[in-house]
Amino acid sequence: MEKNQNIEEPELRWIETPKGRAIINAVSLTVLLAITQHFGYIAPGPPVTLENIILYGIYGVVVGLLMYVWTDFRLRRRRKKIEAAANSAVKDKSEDK
């Protein structure tokens, strides 16, 4: 009984890609910061000004870029592990003969 040594990377949904994660995190952080300020949790008053929205947008972009880099790093590391496993499986198979 031989195991299938062909390990393929699964197809990623758009939200799992680095770009998708960056967009989701940037938008959600901006919206959450505006909502919490509106209810008075992070700033003294309910009026959310354009200046605050711009500031929260900048925070969102920074966090989005960080998530882009982190997700890209994770995907590359996973691809290297998959390639290493495939290469070792091929190497083991050739040594068995």
Image (cartoon, grey):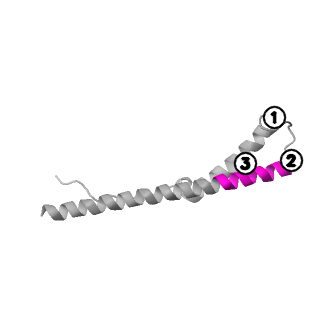
Amino acid type at circle 1 is: Gly
Can you see residue 10? Answer: no
Q: Residues within 10 Å of mark 3 (few under 14, many from 20)?
A: many
Boundaries of the magenta span: 50-63
The total number of labels drawn is 3
Amino acid type at circle 2 is: Thr
- The location of residue 12, given as percent across then percent down, is 48, 56
Q: Which is more N-terminal, label 1 or label 3?
A: 3
Q: Which residue is mark 2?
A: 49
Amino acid type at circle 3 is: Thr
Q: Which circle marks residue 74 in the picture?
A: none
Which of the pair 94/6 is nearer the observer?
94
Give the Cα separation between the discs numbered 3 and 1: 16 Å
Q: Which circle marks residue 30 in the picture?
A: 3
Residue at horizontal 26 percent and vertical 58 percent from the top: 5
- Left/right placement of residue 52 relative to residue 85 reads right
The answer to which quarter of the image holds residue 41 is top right
- Left/right placement of residue 42 relative to residue 67 reads right
